[in-house]
Each structure stands twice: as structure tokens, then as C-alpha cells.
Amino acid sequence: MQTSARETRHDGHSHGSAEGLLLWVLLAAAFVVAGYAVPWLQPGNPGAGDIAAAIGAIMLAAPIVWNAARDLLHGHLHMDELVAIAVLASMAQGDFRTAGVISFFMLISMVVETRTAEGAHKAIEGLVRLTPTTARRLRADGAEEEVPAHLLAAGDRIRMRPGDSVPADGRIAEGRTTLNEATITGESMPAEKGAGEDVFAGTQNLTGAVEVVVTRAGEDTTLGQVRSLIMAAEKTRLPFTALIDRYVGYYTPFVLAVAAFVWFFTGDWDRVVAILVVACPCALILATPTAMVAALSAAARTGILVKNVADLEAVSRTDAVVFDKTGTLTTGELAVARLAPAGDVRPADLLAAAAAAERHSNHPAAQAILRLATGSGLSPATAEDLHEEPGRGVRARVAGDAVVCGRASWLRENGVSVPATADDGASDDAADLSVVHVALDGRHLGWVGLQDQVRPGAKEAIAELRDLRVRRIAMVTGDRPAAARRVAALIDCPEFRAGCLPQAKVDFVNEVRRGAARVAVVGDGVNDAPALAAGDTGIAMGAAGSDVAIHSATIALMSNDLLRVPFLIRLSRATRTVVGQNILVGLLFILGGIALSGAGRIPPILAALLHNAGSLIVIFNSGRLVRAGETLK
């Protein structure tokens, strides 16, 4: 990610790679060194030293002059022209040694910049170019065949052994294993996976042999989409960078005018050459791109997908965060919170009846009941004559007895006498619970209360946002007020809105924005797309494997770790600070260098050294951001 001026420099000077340019520079530098050494070693033969210095100077100046001439032929006026004029002016005076040293330092600066850019790109590519080149595809007869990974298609069945990298997105058909998904989610802990669970291309199979049915391959995989979006983000620019591009064409004539003014009053060509060299604004132009590439690399490593660097910069100004509840602050997975047996009914009997009836249901409440029964050592009895009515309940026959589970109204329709105080949500005890009533042969056995579980790290994330001085933190949900109040109390969220339909969530976000706050909206990216779009920054959680989540927000968290949200704000603020420091360094070196060069305090060779120093300070200062998030779990 470079400005257009910097891209021109890299294209023109890299000779295909930083290594190729470096070899050229070192070869030419040997001639310049000889130009200094020969007169000292052979005082009687100064001409040989002059010839060596001229050869070295011409070799070093050629890439600089060629690139400057190419810019002019294409109608562009960039900073390369300043250096080219300075080098040619030294040569015109017959001072090939000075011209050679200036060119050497300028090209060394370009090598460092090119190498830094290539290294940053390779680091990001390394995070996302992880798909293996081959895969073990299973034929119809069950035999394995090794095929190129890019030939896989949806519906293919592949086999993976321990140590293999996953070649495509898919769903496990057989077996259990442990996967390292850090490349996608940024999570350091391996994930346990079994039949029916999704796997992602580029992750590593650690322990078990599994068979996977391919769902997406090639560029359509989660990894392919992440790669495309990261590389696209590198090409985006901040407003400040665009401003430099806009006015760089005026900068060169201005510097030339200053140099002409100094020459007119002093007649000193060394001052003119020094001004032209030190005025080359490499450090200033590198200030923003180097910091942003480093920040993008750190974000990608921690499972944060940023689509536009302007979005990354904008996060630093966030002073309000609005969270969705279900699936964001909570896991979105129901768990049994209470068993409320009626009369002399034992809790175990209540749970056994409910588990037997719900055994074959895919409803989240049924799955929660079955998990508790299994964890408690109960083996659900076989159910017959199963009838499920979506949104209302299940009716089945277990060991000859009729079992009915569901809403109180559903039980009454099936002839069960349910106390009025046991109506869904009517009891204070069940106000914040989802209630499943259970009846056996027309007798009300009691009810099972379920609730969504608070996501691990939610309370810590809220506390960190407070520490970051985010002045307004709120939760919005379509759930009941009692359930919202419970979650808000558990995570210390100071504000919440309950019973919100999607449009009400959007209205709330707009209300917060009208309060002059810059709002980040955090949601699961599927049901919260309108609210995510309404915020200044939309942050989608758990985006791994979800096209909607990846594309519905400006920033996507590949995992469900809420602590990534305050880390993102810290990274953005650190990046903004580094950019400011880099700009200050660039301006000080340019303005101070021009003033000292005009006063005759800096010779041309020292001007070249100062130019290099400014660029290196900016590059190394930006490099500090690459390590951000290393301590994040």
C-alpha cells in the first residue's frame, strides 16, 4: 500500500526485486570507493580514480535519472526529479565522487523501502496463502486419489490425516479431530471438531483422521475471501495520503524555486545540491503507508479483517459502542438454567420425560435439554409417534405414556391442566427464562427454564472499553426486558434496550449518532446487517465461514472473542499515534534540512545521509505496530 509517487519509485528502481537492486548498487559502489582509494594508493595516477568514480556514479545515477525521465515522459512530476537534478548538477561540475555517494545513499534508501514493502506484503500473504496444493479426494468406490486442490468442487469428499492442512471449506462427515484455526480466527487454542461441524481452508488438522464433504473451494473459501479483502485493503488510502498525491506535483517546482533562489544569492552549487537531496520527501510519503501496512499485518494475525485502512483509522475516534445481545454478548446457545418440578415430582423424572420427548428435535431448547440429560448420566428413552409443531412444542409416546413438552398454551390444547401462575413468563422466577412445560399422561410435571449464556470475555471487554474512555456502551436486543436486564447486570453493561426489532435497532444507533458520538456497532453479521450499516463502524463477529458476516460489516472478527473489540480500538489509536509521529519526523527532516542546506551547514553527502536517516526512522517506528496483539489470547 503506497502512494502513487512511491509506487512509481518502487516500480522503477526495484529491477524486479530489492535483491537485484542491491547487487547493482554494491557493484557500482565498488567503483566509487575505488575513486576515493586510487588517488590515495597511487598519488601519481589520479586519472584512474576519476574514471572509476565516473563509472560508479553513472551506474548509480542511471536508475534515478531513468525513473525521473520516465515520469516526465508520462506527464508526471514527482520527487525523483529532485534527486536526478542534484546528481546531474554534481556531474556537471565534474564531482563524480559526490554524485556517486549521493546516488548510493538514495538507492540504499530505496532498497530498504522496497524490501520493507515486499516483506510486509509477504507477511500478509503468509497469513492467508496457507491452502495446500494437493488433496486426497475419495472416489465413488472409496479409494483415494491425490488431486490438485484447485480442482476440488462442492460435493467432493476428501480425507484428511493428522498434520494435513485443510484444502477447502467443508463439513466433517466422519470422525473427530482437533484443528488449529489460528490462521482464520486468530484463536490460539485448538478447536475440537466432529461430524456435522465446519472446517476452513488453510487450517491445520492436528490429531484425528476425518472425512470432509467440500462446500467451497478455491477463491470462494473463507480463506480466499479473506485474502482478497486484505490485499484490497492494502490498496486503499487515507485522506492524508491522497492529499500528498494531490499536491506532490506542486512540491517539486516549489523546491526547485527555493534552490534557484539560494543559487542566485550564493552561487554555491553544493548548497543547491544539498537542498535538492534533503528536500526529497521520502520520510513524509512513507509516514502513513508503512504504519498502515504494519497495522493491517497485526490485525490479520489476530483474526481481524479490515477492508479499508480508512476504517481502521476511524476506529480510533470511537466514543460509543453498541452491542447486539444474542450471538454477540451471549453465545446464542441455550442452556438449562432451572428445573422446576411440580408437587412431589423429582427433578430427574422431569428431565427424563423432557429429554425423551425432545430426543429427535433440532430445536435449540431441545438440544439444551438433551445436553443436560446426557451430562447428568440419563439415557433418554425411545420415543414413538413423535409429532412436533414448530414454535409450540412436541408430543410423543414414551414407554406407552403420552409426553407433551412446549408452551403452556400447547399443553392446554392437548388436555393438560397447567396452573395460570405457570404461564410462560408469568412467574417472577421465569421472567428472564425461556420456559418448556412438561406433562406425562395429562399430568403437569413442571417446567424447564432455559437461558442464553453470557459469552466468555464479555464482562472483561466492557471493562476494557471503559478503560479506553468509550463514553457510551449499550446493548440492544429483541429479547424480553427481564432477559436483557439479566445479561446487562452480568456483564456490567450500563445501558440496554430490549424488545427491539431490526428497525428499532437502527433507530437507536441513529439516536446515539445524533448525540455527536462516533458509533461502532458490534453484531453477528447475519441478523444485524442493518444496524451494522447504520453505525460509523460495523464490526461483525464470528465471520469465519459466513459470507454475510464478512461482507456486511466494515471490519470482521473471524472469531467470537469480544476482547478483540477493545484491542482493535487500541491498535487503531496506536496506529494514529505512529502516523502522527512519522509525519512530524518527515516534516522536521525536510524543513530543517532545507534551512541548514541553504545556510551552507550541510554538504550534499550529509544531506543524503539525513534523507536516509529520516526514512529509516519512519520505517522502524511503523514496524513497532507489527508486534501488536502478541499477548492477546
Image (spheres, rainbow, N blue to C red):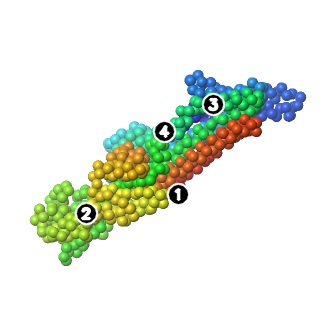
Q: Secondary structure at mark 3?
A: helix
Label located before the other in sequence (4 or 1): 4
The single residue placed furthest to the front in the displayed view is 265
Circle 2 packing at 10 Å, graded few (<14), some (14-19), many (20+), is many
State the residue position of label 2: 434
Give the Cα separation between the discs numbered 1 and 2: 39 Å
Distance CA(mark 1)–CA(mark 3): 47 Å
Q: Is residue 352 left or right of residue 330?
A: left
Would you name the residue on which mark 3 appears?
254
Identity of the residue drawn at 48% across and 54% down: 567
Q: Earlier in the sequence, mark 1 or mark 3?
A: 3
Crowdedness near tag 1: few (<14), some (14–19) or many (≥20) residues, C-alpha within 10 Å:
few
Tell us which disc is closer to us: 4 or 3. Answer: 3
Query: Disc 3 residue type?
Result: Phe
Alpha carbon distance from label 4 to label 3: 28 Å
Q: Is residue 160 visible?
A: no
Say whether disc 1 or disc 2 marks the residue closer to the N-terminus.
Answer: 2
